[in-house]
Image (spheres, rainbow, N blue to C red):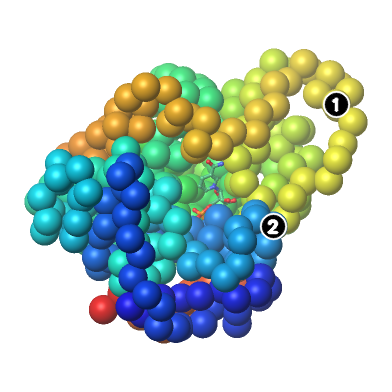
């Protein structure tokens, strides 16, 4: 089969199209024929070696396609499914843990389905877990027009929260506003000051920071006393070590560094969150913005665009 290989970790150029043998599923997996693979920022961490995978490996975690073989015979061949946590999804075939597979209902396109789970479930646990946002709550979302950012903005706004968003361009600002952001800032603004100017002099209840290194200190300043800073990613790089006393000086604030793994680990939790996201897409309350679709051979270009901040919403690879 055709697949993108990483023989040695590094920059986007290490993503090479190769021919490799198709994988064989274990009992707790299903084999799927990939139609579309979702591209996530986390894929760049594996490619760079920031997150470890033994080389050579095929990157990618999520996608949509048809089941080829279920060793337990529970899912019929040909069933249209989406998944996340299927390491090796930048390929024509991948083995996916059976408890991370959901059926794709009619009405959801292959591109939407391929971007729906990893980013959608993340947005869901951020707004319905790390914090249970309710009407009148306020939050700040960095990378507000990214894949997770646009979904988290829609979910937070739908729950009645006031969303302040941070983006890098006018085009991204328009997308964040369309998703329901109340006010949109630039990174060069003094974020803590901007938040207080628009928020009655107060910090926000929750900061969702997926940018990391370059925004983290401002995130601590933008939250209200006893509020929560949720550091959920590192698009600008990992946060440097810091003195926990800062959490005191900013007013007894809470800091969490969550993962989708921990927030889907309870019995039935993955299915519940996946169902909520799927239902929202079907009902039209959650729009998945596909900012780019690349042929498999252009996986490196997809990564270049993602890391150069040229993309908006979710991006995907068309496998065939
Ligand atoms: P995005 O589509 O949001 O792309 C990343 C965005 O980050 C860019 O578009 C850019 O938006 C912004 N950004 C700010 N500074 C930089 C920088 N120096 N270099 C590159 N980008 C920068 O990606 P995803 O939706 O896939 O992921 C968003 C974040 O969520 C990532 O940090 C990812 O690791 C994290 N994540 C965490 C999960 C978890 O469970 N903890 C699960 C899934 C994702 P702009 O141009 O507007 O600044």
| Residue positioned 44% across, 39% down in the render | 123
| Residue positioned 60% across, 76% down in the render | 7
Position of residue 285 measured from the top left corner of the image (x, y, whole percent): 25, 40
| Residue positioned 42% across, 48% down in the render | 85
Who comes first in sequence, dot 1 or dot 2? 2
Q: Quadrant of residue 73?
A: top left
Of the 4 image quadrants, the one containing the N terminus is bottom left
| Residue positioned 55% across, 55% down in the render | 42
Q: Is residue 80 above or below residue 6?
A: above
Distance from Cα at disc 1 to Cα at disc 2: 24 Å
Q: Nearer the viewer, mark 1 or mark 2?
A: 2
| Residue located beneath label 2 in the image | 50
Callout 1 secondary element:
loop
Callout 2 environment at 10 Å: few (<14), some (14 to 19), or many (20+)?
Answer: some
| Residue located beneath label 1 in the image | 244
Callout 2 secondary element:
loop
Position of residue 32 measured from the top left corner of the image (x, y, whole percent): 25, 59
Q: Is residue 58 above or below residue 173?
A: below
Q: Quadrant of residue 141?
A: top right
Q: Quadrant of residue 201?
A: top right
């Amino acid at each position: 089969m055709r697949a993108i290989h990483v023989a040695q970790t590094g920059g986007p150029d290490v993503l090479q199209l190769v021919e490799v043998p198709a994988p064989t599923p274990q009992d707790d997996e299903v084999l799927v024929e990939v139609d579309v693979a979702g591209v996530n920022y986390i894929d760049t961490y594996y490619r760079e070696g920031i997150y470890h995978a033994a080389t050579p490996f095929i990157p990618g975690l999520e996608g949509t396609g048809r089941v080829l073989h279920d060793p337990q015979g529970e899912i019929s061949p040909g069933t249209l499914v989406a998944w996340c946590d299927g390491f090796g999804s930048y390929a024509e075939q991948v083995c996916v843990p059976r408890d991370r597979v959901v059926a794709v209902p009619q009405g959801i396109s292959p591109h939407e389905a391929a971007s729906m789970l990893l980013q959608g479930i993340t947005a869901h646990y951020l707004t319905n877990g790390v914090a249970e946002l309710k009407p009148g709550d306020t939050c700040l979302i960095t990378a507000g027009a990214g894949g997770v950012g646009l979904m988290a903005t829609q979910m937070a706004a739908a729950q009645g929260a006031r969303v302040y968003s941070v983006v890098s361009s006018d085009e991204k600002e328009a997308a964040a506003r369309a998703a329901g952001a109340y006010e949109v800032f630039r990174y060069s603004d003094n974020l803590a000051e901007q938040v207080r100017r628009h928020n009655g002099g107060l910090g926000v209840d929750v900061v969702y920071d997926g940018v990391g290194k370059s925004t983290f200190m401002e995130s601590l300043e933008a939250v209200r006393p006893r509020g929560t800073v949720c550091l959920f990613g590192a698009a600008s790089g990992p946060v440097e070590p810091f003195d926990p006393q800062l959490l005191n000086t900013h007013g007894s604030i809470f800091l969490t560094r969550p993962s989708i793994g921990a927030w889907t680990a309870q019995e039935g939790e993955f299915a519940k969150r996946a169902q909520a996201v799927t239902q929202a897409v079907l009902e039209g309350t959650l729009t998945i913005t596909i900012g780019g679709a690349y042929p498999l051979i252009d996986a490196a270009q997809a990564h270049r665009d993602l890391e150069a901040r040229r993309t908006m919403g979710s991006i995907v690879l068309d496998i065939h």
